[in-house]
Amino acid sequence: MNTRSLTSAGIQAIREMMKKGMLIDIDHMSQATVNATIAFVQSQRGGYPLMSGHNGVRGVLPGVASERSLTSQQYQQLGALHGMAWAARN
C-alpha cells in the first residue's frame, strides 16, 4: 500500500479545482489520498461531488484487491457527495 497521502499542495489543487467547478477523478490516487480527498471535500460547506470513472469494488468483485480499487464504503461516500462512479465487472 502506498502510504503517501494528500499534501498541502494537493489540498490547494483540489480547492482550486472546486472553485472552477472541475471534475475531480480519484481513480489514480492511493487509498490514503482517496480517503484524505473524500474527508477534505466532506469538510467543505455543501461537500463536492467526486468521480470514479473506471474502477472496481475491492473485495466484492473477483480479482479486485488492489488499493487502486475503491471499497464499498468509499463508493457510499461518493454517493453521499452526489458524485459519479462506475464499477467495472470482470
Image: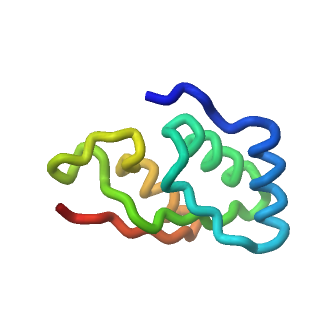
As drawn, 7 above or below 63: above
Q: Could you tell me which residue is drawn at 37 percent across and 49 percent down?
A: 69
Q: Could you tell me which residue is drawn at 81 percent across and 56 percent down?
A: 15
- The answer to which quarter of the image holds residue 34 is top right
As drawn, 13 above or below 24: above
Q: Is residue 63 left or right of residue 15?
A: left
Q: Give percent across and percent down for residue 17.
A: 77, 64
As drawn, 74 above or below 31: below
Q: Is residue 1 left or right of residue 83?
A: left
Residue 67 or residue 43, whichever sits in front: 67
The C terminus: image quadrant: bottom left
Q: Give percent across and percent down for residue 74.
A: 45, 50
Q: Give percent across and percent down for residue 21.
A: 76, 74
Residue 8 or residue 59, whichever sits in front: 8
Q: Give percent across and percent down for residue 47.
A: 70, 61
Q: Could you tell me which residue is drawn at 52 percent across and 40 percent down?
A: 30
The colour scheme used to paint the residues is: rainbow
The number of numbered badges drawn on the structure is 0
Q: Could you tell me which residue is drawn at 68 percent across and 64 percent down?
A: 48
- The answer to which quarter of the image holds residue 14 is bottom right
The N terminus: image quadrant: top left
